[in-house]
Image (tube, rainbow, N blue to C red):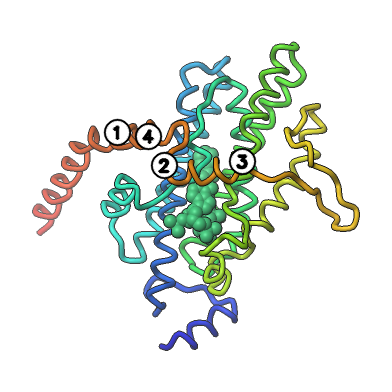
Amino acid sequence: MTEEKFQKRIDREEKIEPKDWMPEGYRKHLIRQISQHAHSEIIGMQPEGNWISRAPSLRAKMILLAKVQDEAGHGLYLYSACETLGVSRQELVSQLHSGKAKYSSIFNYPTLSWADMGAIGWLVDGAAIVNQVSLQRTSFGPYSRGMVKICKEESFHQRQGYEIMAQMAQGTSEQKAMAQDALNRFWWPSIMMFGPNDSDSPRTGNAMKWKIKRKTNDELRQEFIDKTVNQAEIIGLTIPDKDLKWNDERQHYDFGEMDWDEFWSVVNGNGPCNKQRLNHHKKAHDDGQWVREAAKSYSQKKELIAN
Ligand code: BYC
C-alpha cells in the first residue's frame, strides 16, 4: 500500500489496526506519543502515592488508593497498545530511564498538602479528560479503544478531586486557604499539560494529518479553561490569572500567558521533582527485577511441562 492510499483510509475515518500497513513515520509517532502517555500514568502515581498513608479518613484513603491503582491500570493498557506497534516494554522503559522518552511535565511538581490531592483530581485529571475524550477518536484502533476505557475512570477521578476541593473550600478558614494555595500552585502547571502553542508545536502537523490528535494543543487548552472557570466560581475559589476574562465576541475566556521558560525547563528535565521521580522509578524497576525473572522462569517451566 502507498502513503496515498493510507491517507485515504485515514480520511475515510477507518481505524488503523496493528497488522495493517502504515508509514514508518506514523508508527514512530504513535510509539512516541502512546509510550509518553503510558509513562505519564505510571510516573503520575508518585505525587498522589505520597499522600496515601496520610489521608485524613479511611474513606479518603480507600478512594485515593483506588485512584492510584487505576493510574497503574491505565499505564498498562497504554503500554500494551504501544507494544502492538512492535516495540518491547523493556525498550520503552529504557527510553524513559535514559531521558529519551518524556512524560507529562505536571508530575514534576511536589504535593505539599492534602488539598493537592483535590487539585490534582480536579485540575490534572480534568485536563487529562479533555485531552483524552478527543483521543477516543484517534485513528489507531488499540489507542482509541484504550482511551474509551480510561475516560470512564478518569471522570470518577475528576469528581473525587473536585469533592475534596469543595469540602475544603467550605471548611475552616485554614482549610479554605489550603485549597486556594493548591489551586494557585497547580493552575499553571495544569494549563501547561496541553503543551506548547500550536505555532511552536512541531508534532501537531503530522498528528492532525494522520488524525492521531483530533484537536490541537491550543483548542484543548481553551476547552479546559472554559469548562473549569465556572467550577472554581461555584466553590468560591479564585483562579490565579488576572487576565482571565470572558470574551463575548469569541464566546471563550481570554487568559494570561504561561511562563514558557518554566514549561521548557520542566519538559527538559529541570523541574522541581524531575530527578526524584525518575530515580524513584529506576529504583522500583531494579527492585522488581526478581519478579520479572521469576515470572519468566515460571512461564518457561509451564511451557516445558505442556510440551
Ligand atoms: N509535558 O509538538 P508537541 C494522567 C513535549 S497522565 C512533557 O506539541 P505533541 C494522569 C512533546 O512530547 C495524562 N512534554 O508534541 C496520571 C514533544 O517532545 P518530543 C498524560 C511535553 O506530542 C496520573 C515536544 O514537547 N496525557 O492523566 O503533539 C494521575 C513538542 O510538543 C508536554 C498524555 O500524555 C508536557 N506537558 O503534543 C493523574 C496525552 N507538552 O516527544 C492524571 C497524550 C509537550 O518530540 N499526549 N511536550 O520529544 C498528547 O496529547 C500530546 O503528546 C501532548 C504534546 C499534548 C502532550
Q: Are marks 1 and 2 in contact (CB under 8 Å)?
A: no
Q: Is residue 149 left or right of residue 46?
A: right
Q: Which residue position is annotated with label 2?
A: 269
Q: Secondary structure at mark 1?
A: helix
- From the viewer's perspective, is the residue at label 3 or at label 2 nearer? 2
Q: Is residue 31 above or below residue 230?
A: below
Q: Secondary structure at mark 4?
A: helix
Q: Amino acid at mark 1?
A: Ala
Indicate the position of residue 304 as horizontal and vertical percent values: 9, 54
Q: Are marks 1 and 4 in contact (CB under 8 Å)?
A: no
Q: Nearer the viewer, residue 116 or 62?
A: 116
Q: Which residue position is annotated with label 4?
A: 275
* Between discs 1 and 4, the one toward the N terminus: 4
* Between discs 1 and 2, the one toward the N terminus: 2
> Could you tell me if residue 242 is visible in this image?
yes
Of the 4 image quadrants, the one containing the C terminus is bottom left
Q: Is residue 34 left or right of residue 236?
A: left
Q: Amino acid at mark 3?
A: Ser
Q: Which residue is drawn at the image coordinates 77% and 33% (left, top)?
A: 232
Q: Are marks 3 and 1 in contact (CB under 8 Å)?
A: no
Q: Which residue is drawn at the image coordinates 16% and 42% (left, top)?
A: 293
> Could you tell me if residue 145 is visible in this image?
no
Q: Which residue position is annotated with label 1?
A: 284
